């Protein structure tokens, strides 16, 4: 069962790279109302109504800010620091039931996974969407990110193996699309020379 906890932790921290508050809220609610996840101290504080209420408030602000042109760029800069932190928290909280995983290692893994996803989102995907659609594609992409983050968060806890496969599939699709786009640019540059 420990491998499922690790897969779950990776899935949750990856989804935090898309939206910081969704996996935090999913963990809090599922730990509060179900037996699907058990949070050990000090992470069990996430089941407090104050924490849940704060997460709902922050999620509403983040979702709205990410859908407003011009504000979404400022939000992305701010969230670039929040997402890796959230990834570290969800990784450490979900992996806390594994007794022999060092807490510092769990936090670093969460920071790395969420930070990587967040960096690809902020530095590659969003600028490409803005450049190719004149900003019109940012809202649909933001909605897709929120849906993906929610789905990955729930699956990471309920069915961690499926969540891992989903995250690998999404990552592969993004890499293939980026590779094809880069290849097309190179071919176009070569064709322009002749």
Image (tube, grey):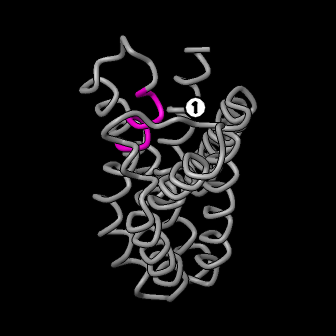
Q: Quadrant of the N terminus?
A: top right
Query: What residue do we see at 58% from left, 31% from top?
Result: 8
Q: Is residue 94 magenta?
A: yes
Foreground residue, 4 or 83? 4
**Of residues 25 and 124, the one drawn nearer to the viewer in this rendering:** 25
x then y, percent, for residue 22: 54, 59
Q: Position of residue 5 (x, y in %)?
A: 55, 24
The structure residue drawn at horizontal position 65% and vertical position 71%, both measured from the top left corner, is 143
Seen in the image, is 132 located left or right of residue 52? right
Any magenta on residue 33? no
**Residue 33, position as x, y percentages in the image:** 63, 52
Stretch of the chain drawn in magenta: 89-96
Q: Which secondary structure lies at badge 1? A: helix
Quadrant of residue 37 within the rendered picture? top right
Can you name the residue that lies furthest to the left here?
104
Kindly identify which residue carries mark 1: 8
Q: Main secondary structure of the magenta part?
A: helix
Q: Residue at x 46, y 53 (%)?
A: 47
Residue pictured at 47% horizontal, 61% vertical? 21
In which image quadrant can residue 192 be found? bottom right
Residue 47 position (above or below residue 3) = below
Q: Nearer the viewer, residue 33 or 90?
A: 33
Badge 1, how many Cα within 10 Å: few under 14, some, many 20+? many
For the image, the number of numbered tags is: 1
Q: In the figure, is residue 92 to the left or right of 29?
A: left
Q: Is residue 183 above or below residue 62?
A: above
């Amino acid at each position: 069962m420990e491998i499922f906890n690790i897969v779950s932790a990776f899935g949750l921290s990856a989804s935090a790279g898309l939206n910081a508050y969704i996996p935090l809220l999913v963990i809090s609610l599922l730990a509060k109302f179900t037996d699907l996840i058990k949070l050990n101290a000090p992470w069990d504080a996430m089941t407090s109504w104050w924490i849940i209420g704060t997460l709902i408030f922050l999620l509403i602000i983040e979702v709205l800010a990410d859908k407003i042109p011009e504000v979404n760029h400022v939000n992305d800069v701010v969230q670039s620091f929040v997402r890796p932190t959230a990834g570290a928290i969800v990784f450490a909280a979900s992996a806390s039931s594994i007794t022999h995983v060092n807490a510092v290692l769990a936090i670093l893994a969460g920071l790395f996974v969420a930070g990587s996803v967040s960096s690809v989102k902020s530095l590659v995907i969003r600028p490409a969407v803005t450049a190719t659609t004149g900003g019109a594609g940012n809202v649909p992409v933001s909605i897709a990110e929120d849906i993906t983050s929610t789905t990955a968060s729930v699956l990471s806890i309920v069915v961690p193996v499926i969540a891992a496969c989903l995250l690998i599939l999404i990552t592969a699709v993004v890499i293939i699309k980026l590779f094809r786009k880069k290849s097309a640019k190179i071919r176009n540059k070569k064709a322009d020379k002749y």
